[in-house]
Image (tube, grey):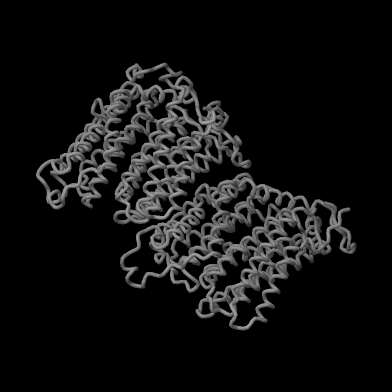
Amino acid sequence: MNQVPDIYRILPEVILTLTGVAIMLTDATLAPRVARRPLGWVGALGTTLALWASLWQLSLPVGTGFYGTVETSPFTVFFHVLICGIVLVALLLSLDTLPEDSHHQGEYYALVVFGAVGMCLLTGAVELLLVFIALEISSIATYVLAGWRKSTGRGPEAAIKYFLLGSFATAFLLYGVALIFGATGTTQIYEIAQTVSGAKNQSLVLAALALMLVGILFKVSAAPFHVWTPDVYEGSPSPVVALLSTAPKAAAFALLLRVVYEMFPTLRAVWIPMLWVVAVLSMTVGNLAALRQQNVKRMLAYSSIAHAGYLLAAFAGLGASGIAAASFYTAAYAAMNVGIFAVITVASGYDETLPLVQDFRGLIYRSPLLGSLLIFFLVSLVGIPFTGGFFGKFYSFTAAVGGGAVWLAIIGLLNSGLAAAYYLRLALAAAQKPSPESSRGLASPQVAQVGVAVGAALALAVAATLVLGIVPGEVLRAAQAGAHTLLAIPAQPVPARVNLVQLPTP
Amino acid sequence: MNEINHLILTLIVLVPLAGAVLVALVPDRAKLPNWIALLTTLASFGLALHLPAHFNSGLPGFQYEVNIPWIESPAIFYHVGVDGLSLWLVVLTGLLGPIGVVASWNAIKDRRKVFYSLFLVQQTAMVGVFVSLDLMLYYGFWELSLVPMAILIAMYGRKDGPKAAMKFFLFTFIPSAPLLVAILWLYAQTGSFDFATLQILIAHGSFPAGPICWIAFAFLFAFAVKVPVFPLHGWLADTFCEAPVALAMVVAGKLGLYSMLRFHIGLFPEQARAVAPWLIALAVVGVLYGACLALVQRDFWKLMAFAALSHLSLITLGIYGMTFGGWTGAVYQILSHGVVDGALFLLLGVLYDRYATSQIDNYGGFASKLPRTATLFVIASLAMIGLPMLSGFVGEFLILSNTFLGVNKGWAIAATLGVILGAAYMLWLVQRLFYGPESALATSKAPCDLHFRERAILWPLAVLMLVMGLAPSIWLPTIQTGMHPPQLKGSVVVRSIPAVSSPGEVLR
């Protein structure tokens, strides 16, 4: 019997928590005039360590800790690495773009890191109460971050909208947890999976499934639960949106995968049509709305709704292929979306001097590097081969076709043709010669220099997008390994709750 | 030697890409990006010349093949190779590289790094399309070829670049979605993206007849837009007006026509035969329609666009006549059209550079001011018209005579009428640009004839046109090896590869 100390099961979270606490305490003890910027580097270092710790967890036998509440498996490691990677890029991005004089910088970095704790924990939790706690940890941090720009009205508006709607959605999730506890008498996901088909009151189970889906689909901003997304993205500072549009969604998708594939595999016939409808709605609503947007961040918000739809198409896939495709798409989406928000942050600055599509006109002439990168990430979002966006869509729709949802794939591909129109509008505006009026009129917005930290962030995003597009094999294998563990675990015996030291044999 | 043969195609694909990265890294100083781009394209052309030098025309099938796994799941292979069909197209693409760089030498004044990087990426994508034998790899390069084109049209458009770029991109991107579905469907049925495997499976009728018709149609539709075939040419005129010269000369034609031959007729011979009558009709309409519109254009870029539509339709006619001689003529005509169009675009680019207008009426009487430009323009125009002893004649003759003998006399006569109209608009263009009374434009500026770089490219091209017209037997035997037996399965014309050495024998 191979005993793994419980603490190893949550090592990345522990490292992140310690980093967050250290940042917060140092921030409190520093004199007000001392620059808080180095604390950001501390956060980046801690996140890197957490990333290594996650990779190290691969050497642990698959299993749970803390009385069957937290799991480590290739599945959790995949999402841990993804989330830590996103948070690292977001921190690097913030380092160079947050205003120098802000004496709240320390809190900012601490909140980002605490948010990461919640997101990581969410992907590893196999106990619904812990799921709820993890979701709250990540949500509260992101609510605060969304309202960071207090000087404009839009900041607090974004935070309040996000907070109110978010808490409402979390309540749905919690209600679902309560109902499933009522139906099965447990909140441990493996146990639910084993007992759910024998539960006496099936309508309770169905209600629980529906309520939980509402809560999670809100977090991934899938239509019709998407209305908060454009307002929040528009109001939040761009580096926060880089984080907000990717990391919590990756965590929520991990949870969704766990809920539908691991907890309710027997209800496949119920959740498949639900997700089918949500996927089609998200793609179509997202793309149609994005076509009309003039504000870049709102346009990308709708684009992220459409991408949630493409991703949900993968759920129509059978077993491992669907999970692997969804995991891969999450990674590809995160890489390119973090990248494009990074470019927008640098080009437009913290104060967002370039809110509209036509403001980006001639970016490639003003700054060839930023212009090229913007076009690169847009090309990836369109889904051109040799970028991550292509293989993401490719695997997702292949999985859908494999699961028999041919129409879903066709609707998805038509949608991605439609989406090319608005991505291209921005890309071509950036490629166009700057107009003579704009250079005279508004004193041609100065494009910020690309600093070391931002440079590293952009390089990471570009590298990830290219790797996923040119040699996706390795990442796909990791995603498949995760998929297999997700499907295999519920079949194994679950430790009795009273037997506190007993661990499942790997 | 074997080592080189193994690596050569990969090198031809990757050298421009490496050049693109290098251009992106060097400082934009003193024409440095131009020189790097020129050297890269020359190196790539040199490497491409290795292919015909060591090509064994005795062997049918693919040569210089490399087939290594690229992605495990789905099973995508890095499978490249050339046969008689693609061999010279790769060389042509290599040749058009340095021509494009020279054509842009002075025309592109700002953001040269971005321009030459994307230009070189475009070269990689085009060569990639011609050498890929794995459908997924092919699709990758096919899509990749759209991106630099669209960005460069938007960046350097003459009037409204982004609009033309958007039109071009959406016109070609949206039909490629059904193409991708079709490729995935084939994969779902067979578990393979490999061209040869699929070809054999389809030839043995391992697929249900209903879906395969739709699959073949999805392939055809994507290619027909790219060529473009008659009612799908909406993007062509705007793109020709807005695109930088170096890209306008490669944007239409060869990728789509090659794909028709390789992936539509090659994979779905039965289905292709079924739609052939429709395409023949559309092609003939395209020949006449393009020629008529070219006659009335006032802008020489637009004239070139409709002339291209007319010529490309003639090649489509050769392809869908489904005769062996027609195919050979079509490939030869693609090569000739590439060379001639390259030269004409370069010369018109020279005029546009010097005088900043594309309105034909503004020109006139330039022959005495720019004698070299005029001479070369006349040679290229005659080659384009299809004057015997110049390159355009061989292909046109093969296509028209095979259509006449093997397909339908009426269509052949109608298409020949289009060719006559072609002579009319080209000669009239020459007359209006270079002869007649001297225009205000001609006297307004000190004449500035061709630079050394331009002459160094254009004279060899003129010689090439002459050689292609006089000695087609240098090219034709190799091209004929590219028409595989599977491609001709069930063909009424030829059942195996005849040992042919001259175009005359093809006809018999």
**In-image side of B350 versus B436 (left or right):** right
Residue farthest left in this picture: B437
Image location of residue A476, percent across then percent down: 64, 48
The x and y percentages for residue A354 are: 43, 69
Q: Is residue B194 above or below residue A355?
A: above
Q: Which residue is the extreme one toward the right?
A: A499
The relative height of residue B471 versus residue A4 in the rendered view (above or below) is above
> Residue farthest to the bottom?
A32
Q: Residue at x 74, y 57 (%)?
A: A263
Could you tell me if residue B468 is visible in this image?
A: yes
The tally of labels here is 0
Q: Which residue is more in the foreground, A276 or A125? A: A125
Residue B374 versus residue A251: which sits nearer the camera? Answer: B374
Lateral position of residue B490 relative to residue B319, left or right: right
Whether residue A139 sits left or right of residue B52 in the image: it is: right
Q: In front: B298, or A318?
A: B298
Residue occupying the point 24% across, 49% down: B352
